[in-house]
Amino acid sequence: MSNTLFDNIWDRHVVKSISEGLDVIYIDQHFIHEVTSPQAFDGVRKRGVGVFRPDKCLATADHNVPTINQSEPIKDPESAKQVASLEKNCEEYGIELYSMGHENQGIVHIIGPDLGITQPGMTIVCGDSHTSTHGAFGTIAFGIGTSQVEQVLASQCLVLNRPKTLKIEVNGSLKQGVTAKDVILYIISQLGTEGATGYFVEYAGEVFRNFSMDERMTVCNMSIEMGARGGMVGIDQTTIDYVTERTSISDEKINDWLSLNSTADSKFDKVISLEGENISPMVTCGTAPDTGINLNATIGSSKHLSSKALDYMKFDGADLISDQKIDYVFIGSCTNGRIEDLRSVARIVEGKTKADHVNVWVVPGSMKVRAQAIEEGLDKIFTAAGFEFREPGCSACLAMNDDKIPAGSLCVSTSNRNFEGRQGPGARTILASPLTAAASALTGKVTDPTTIMELA
């Protein structure tokens, strides 16, 4: 019986086994941003140990950066301080940094894949929970806390408990309008926010095999929203084509990557099988990612919706989610800020105009994505539709920058979390796919994208 993809990568990176299930693991790539790194740098500085492998670290500014007028100084004092601290620390320790104004700047989980840095078989960490995004390439990628950021800076290693393995298979065909975001929202709605706790997930089955790398990244990004340590997809020609378009790789290396894959007789600790035909376009209706329902459902049909969340969202459980009037639409984040996401939005909104009462922000995930969107004329489609096309950053995914949703406002968001205050104090968030977000922007209420697609 062969090992799983996860086991094969893990075993290759064990520096030392401390006890059964507890290992020292070597980290191939450490991504850094401005929010979780200052205390870690202070720690290595005070201990006098320095940064062990600065060549295995890459930093970018993303959480605190504004998404308009980036050529001007950051106005918020705390945000300016964090970005300046990142710049100072990277200069001191010789770490490559893509800060504001750099052609490679962007959200940390988007620039790594886009620049060919993320590659199969790697161990990847970052002081950010959505580091699981990189698992789409067949990597062990996960978020770490500030104390662990310090450990990696000092030693390029971490002491870790070995997670269990969970295979989630989705087979069959997806219906029109169903995207990768809908698939992962459906999975989370079935398992709950703690359904994969203690596991590292491998996504398998024909649905994931047919997904592009951008789509796989969306799925892996949200693995942690069901409690998983991370998520990954097997290495195949789709993976290899994406990486080799961005960097030169030998045939020997490619064959080695393929040898890591799980096989039919690999032993997982748990297996869950789902059918793609059962998935419809999804949105959340509460304050947790597991409150996903289809767009024809009543709000109260969510089995994970609490009365507290219902009160916060100001919803009536008997109402249809599709009857809810919205105020904002946010298209972006490390979940859905890639070029394929922007293209899908453009296809929906081209030649149309947003509802008058809705504010729409389209925020590309990186400077590279933004440049590509402009080259393809997507920016003109967005502005003609009344959308704001902004500069790269985490933006309205979280309330750490200027792009906050006002208290009480209802926002359809392509980001990954919807807890109370995530997008700003008192803000109400509905998680959705780029297609659903675009359709909702046009009608001014939560809208099934297939209704717009059928009219096209």
Image: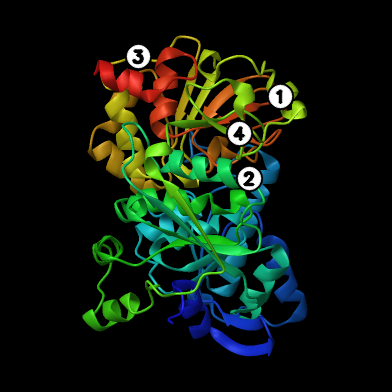
- Asked if residue 102 shows in the view, the reply is no
Residue identified by numbered label 2: 192
Q: Is residue 263 left or right of residue 65?
A: left
SS state under label 1: helix
Quadrant of the rendered image containing residue 378? top left
The alpha-carbon separation of the residues under discs 2 and 3 comes to: 37 Å
* Mark earlier in primary sequence (4, 3): 3
Q: Is residue 272 left or right of residue 227?
A: left
Q: Residue at x 66, y 26 (%)?
A: 427
Sequence-earlier tag: 3 or 1: 1
Say which label, 1 or 2, has the lower sequence index: 2
Q: CA distance from mark 3 to mark 1?
A: 31 Å
Give the foreground label among 3 and 1: 1
Residue 228 % position (x, y) = 60, 58
The answer to whether residue 359 of the structure is visible from this angle is yes
Disc 2 marks a residue whose amino acid type is Gly
